[in-house]
Amino acid sequence: QLQLVESGGGLVQSGQSLRLSCAGSGFTLGYWAMCWFRQAPGKEREGVSCISASGKTTAYGDSVKGRFSISRDNAKKTMYLQMNSLKPEDTGVYYCAGIYYSDYDEVPPVTYEYGMEYWGKGTLVTVSP
């Protein structure tokens, strides 16, 4: 059974850092492009960052460029999101999601929410002022 499980969320103060992880099981994560999305209370879900299956290509939403960094370790079947200089507006539930592309260097745009094929259940990040 294919499964994505996020971890690493928590409560931090503004300016601090967190690293989220997304572990895959039941499939070969290395064949899938992966993304992070987030949903703040009362707001629509938005794309944060995406990475190609190979890890060579990445994409970021404008609000996180220069602060967040996406990476993956296919041998460990895990994707990461390093979040630095966190702001209260980064608060929300963070989800990882996957999509299969035959081109392992291809990455979806961060807005490609409705094209994602598999989703995790999310991890909560709360940034206090």
Image (cartoon, grey):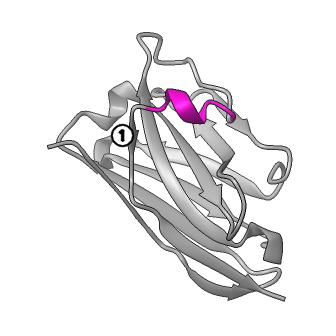
Q: Is residue 23 left or right of residue 129?
A: left
Task: Check the image and report above or below for 14 versus 78.
Answer: below
- What x and y, as percent, mark residue 24? 30, 48
Judged from the image, the secondary structure of the residue bearing numbered disc 1 is helix
Residue 110 occupies quadrant: top right
Task: Check the image and report above or below for 78 versus 11.
Answer: above
Q: Residue at x 45, y 28 (%)?
A: 53
**Residue at the outermost left position:** 1
- What x and y, as percent, mark residue 88? 81, 77
Task: Check the image and report above or below for 82 versus 69.
Answer: below
- Counting the numbered discs, the total is 1
Q: Residue at x 35, y 25 (%)?
A: 31
Residue 90 occupies quadrant: bottom right
Q: Nearer the viewer, residue 86 or 45?
A: 45
- What x and y, as percent, mark residue 34? 49, 37
Residue holding disc 1 = 74
Asked if residue 87 shows in the view, the reply is no
Q: Is residue 123 left or right of residue 68?
A: left
Q: Is residue 58 left or right of residue 25?
A: right
Q: Residue at x 47, y 26 (%)?
A: 54
Asked if residue 6 shows in the view, the reply is yes
Q: Quadrant of the C terminus?
A: bottom right
Q: Residue at x 72, y 60 (%)?
A: 43
Magenta range is: 111-116
Task: Let me know if residue 96 is in the magenta part.
Answer: no
- What x and y, as percent, mark residue 114? 54, 32
Task: Check the image and report above or below for 29 versus 54.
Answer: below
What type is the residue that disc 1 sits on?
Answer: Asn
**Residue at the outermost front position:** 42
Q: Residues within 10 Å of mark 1 (few under 14, many from 20)?
A: some
